[in-house]
Amino acid sequence: MEGYNKLVRNKIPAILDSKGVTYEKRVASPEEYRRELIKKLSEEVNEFTEAGDPEELADVLEVIAALRKLPEYREVEELRLKKLEERGGFDEKIILKGEK
């Protein structure tokens, strides 16, 4: 059986219990939690990039929602809106081609 040591959704231990799967569980420190969320974001973005599946995008959004609850990211929505005002969004589907 392949080993793992990663952040999982809150209900995963109960799901594993119901299937009789053995595991060790611990709660991350705040700094470890932040690091693990960032790793999880990368993992979920890669899965979405490969599959393009709405379920994978939902996973990306769930990790982002968890990150936004951390003190250092609480202002991210204001930053997003500021960038939207200054630089616009992506809804006009503009593709640029040029030299770097």
Image (cartoon, rainbow, N blue to C red):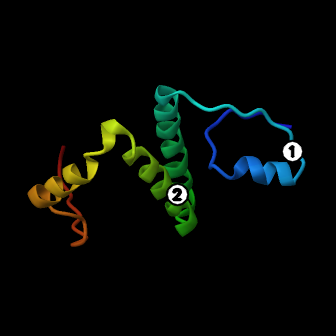
Left or right of 1: which side holds 50? left
Residue type of the residue flagged with mark 1: Val
Crowding at mark 2 (Cα within 10 Å: few <14, some 14-19, many 20+): some
Left or right of 5: which side holds 72? left
Quickly name the residue at label 2: 48
- Write down the quadrant of residue 53 in the picture: bottom right
Locate residue 19, reporting x and y percent: 87, 53
Locate residue 36, reporting x and y percent: 53, 35
Most extreme residue toward the left is 86
- Write down the quadrant of residue 6 in the picture: top right
Residue at 31% x, 36% y is 72
Residue at 26% x, 53% y is 77
Q: Which numbered dot is residue 21?
A: 1
- Secondary structure of the residue carrying numbered label 1: loop
| Quadrant occupied by the C terminus | top left
Residue type of the residue flagged with mark 2: Phe
- Secondary structure of the residue carrying numbered label 2: helix
Left or right of 48: which side holds 26? right
Most extreme residue toward the bottom is 92
Residue at 53% x, 68% y is 54
Residue toward you, 54 or 21? 21
Point out the frontmost of discs 1 and 2. 1
Q: Earlier in the sequence, mark 1 or mark 2?
A: 1
Crowding at mark 1 (Cα within 10 Å: few <14, some 14-19, many 20+): few
